[in-house]
Structure formats: structure tokens, C-alpha cells
Amino acid sequence: MDDKSKSFLYSYLNNASPVGFEASGQKIWLDYIKPYIHDYHVDTYGSVVGIVNPDAPYKVVIEAHADEISWFVNYINPDGYIYVIRNGGSDHVIAPSKRVNIHTEKGIVKAVFGFPAIHTRKGDKLDLKPTLQNIFLDCGCSSKAEVEELGIHVGSVVTFEDGLMELNGKYLVGRALDNRMGGFMIAEVTRRLHENGVKLPFGLYVVNSVQEEIGLRGAEMISRYIKPNLAICTDVCHDTKSPMYDKILEGEQACGLGAVLTYGPAVQNNVLKMLLKVAQEKQIPFQRAAVDRSTGTDTDSFAFSGTGVASALISLPLKYMHTTVETVHKDDVESVIKLMYEFIAQLEADQDFRYFK
């Protein structure tokens, strides 16, 4: 990762892009890829597409999602304490003692998730646990009116404050690596194709979708607009070697061992075979995973769009999903970038991925 990539990564990851409010992050992402594309499109809800060879009839998508989990202000009580509901799969268990940013038209308001002190949790409160009903925000106000004077209202979005850091020179740690690491990786693929002078015989649509965290909605919309012939999506998957995972149920994937290729109904077998072949020929480390029904990623939206789009999923192993310390290995990030790059670089125009001939 050179200085330019690293600067983009930190700027993009440290920016907040909550579900439904992704615009600021999308602008950072688009500004980075603009030198490497010919055109771009922004749809009604904020998904962004960088396009190489926009006039080519055969269309190939590489895709990630841009949104991060967050909270909505749902109720402000008379004493100025704020109660929230989820915006995406936010985890109430990790909330107490976290610092947050409340996004208002007047700017950012700082707040914290409070919780009763351990000294007071006795008797029937000994094992008091955080729930969606008892977690609350304190922004330093003593009345509802004082909260509202700061610009906070029902519907204001709340994001955790934690920024990107590194562990042991090997790992990247922070909130929203799910899945803005994907946005970083597809941007790097686009940059490398351009800088290495790769002339593509098809249209490449580099898609950063919105609203994945509430049901794959952005990908659903943008897939109908593009009508691609092929889609390669990237998202994160669980590192099941970290404690308290059941490998019998979750499979076995681990950070540091390479990109993860998934088997499942939404993954078109011939596309998967080509990805496996590229990984083996180029000696790119990879792992395998299986899903019983859906992948739970934007791959599903692309695969089942229109009359069907040949699709596959390349996942990045990640520890501690949907927390503020999501953790990925730098080597895996490079493996995903290389696999996607090499796949695209050797793809032919009108590549035939029919199920059988």
C-alpha cells in the first residue's frame, strides 16, 4: 500500500457513512477513482458507479457496499437523555461507554452511551445487561429543550466515534471496515488497471452501493439500472478462528490466510471456477466457504436481478463484525485486490458463463 492508497484509506474509513446518509463517503470514494474512469453515475438513493468504456455492450460489475451501521434518535426524555433505535444491524451489547457523534444540520454533537455503574448493580440488577430498551445517550443536557437547541431531533443519525488504527503492523482495526474496505479494494483494482495500462474489451462498472445493511437495497436498485452480464461482489465474512465461534456451523475461515471464495446458490458455478483457476495460476492465497441459502451480501441482489446475472462473491475475513474494532489482515486485503484484478485483466469480451452448453 503506497502513500496515496493509505491516505485514501484513512480518509474514507474515518469518515461516517451511515445507512441512508452515505453522501460524504461516496464523494471521497468518487474523487479517488475519477482519474481512472471515463464516466460515472450517481443514482437516486446514492449508489455510485465509476465506468470504464461506457459504450461497450458487454458489462462487468465489481461491487462493494458503502454504508455502515448506525443509530437513529427515537425518543428524548424530559431530563435530556436520548433513546435510540437501530439503523442497520447495530449491536446494543457493545454500546455502553462508547463515544458517539450525533449528526445534525448544525454540525456534529458529541455524546456518550451511558450505563449504571457496576457498584449499583446489586440484587436483581447484578446481571443487568444492555438492551435496546435501556441503552441511552447523554449529550450533556438536562432537558429535552436543551437537547433540541443543539439541533438534535427524532431521526438524527448517531455513529460511533472510533477511527482506524493498526495492530502489530499486520492488521487494520476500526468501525465500518464492513464494508468500506470493499470500497477501498474495488477502487484499488480500478487504479491498478489504469496505471498498468490494461485495455479492457468490455465495460467495467465499479459500483459502491448504499443500504446493504438494511436489506441489499442499493444493489437491488443499481443492478436494474446497469443490467450487467457479470458481477463480482466483495464483502466481509467472519474469522471463525477467533474465540466463541462454532466451526461446525460457521465453517472455518481466518484472517491472514487469503480471500474467501463462496459456494452457494447465488454464486454461478462457472464464474466461481474461473476465479479458482485464476487464484491457483497466480498463486493468490484463498480459502473456501459455503452458504446454505443466500450469501447475505449484495451478490444475491445482482445474481437474481432481471433474468439473472452470472455472479460470484470474494470475501475478506474479518474479526468482530458490527463492532467498533472490526479487524482485517493487510495480506488478505492484498489477496482480494489481486484476485479481482487478475480476473478482470484476463476476462474476454462476451465471456460465456452459460450454465452448460
Image (spheres, rainbow, N blue to C red):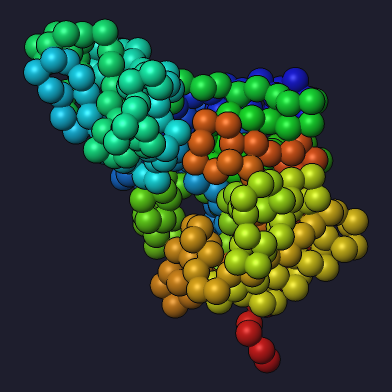
Q: Nearer the viewer, residue 142 or 106?
A: 142
Query: In the image, 235: left or right of 69?
Result: right
Query: In the image, 64: left or right of 77?
Result: right
Q: Quadrant of residue 7?
A: top right
Q: Residue furthest front?
A: 123
Q: What residue lies at 55% left-to-right and 21% top-to-bottom?
A: 163
Where residue 97 appears, x then y in whole percent?
A: 42, 21
Is 195 located above or below residue 15 in the figure? below
Q: Residue furthest bottom?
A: 357
- Report the number of discs: 0
Residue 208 in view in this figure: no
Q: Quadrant of residue 140?
A: top left
Where residue 138 appears, x then y in whole percent?
A: 28, 16
Q: What residue lies at 73% left-to-right and 32% top-to-bottom?
A: 171
Q: Nearer the viewer, residue 342 or 250?
A: 250
Q: In which quarter of the image is residue 189?
A: top right
The C terminus - image quarter: bottom right
Residue 138 in view in this figure: yes
Where residue 301 appears, x then y in whole percent?
A: 45, 63
Where residue 113 appears, x then y in whole percent?
A: 35, 22
Query: In the image, 233: left or right of 169?
Result: left
Q: What residue lies at 12% left-to-right and 11% top-to-bottom?
A: 143
The N terminus - image quarter: top right
Q: Which of 98 and 42 is in front in this view?
A: 98
Q: What residue lies at 59% left-to-right and 36% top-to-bottom?
A: 326
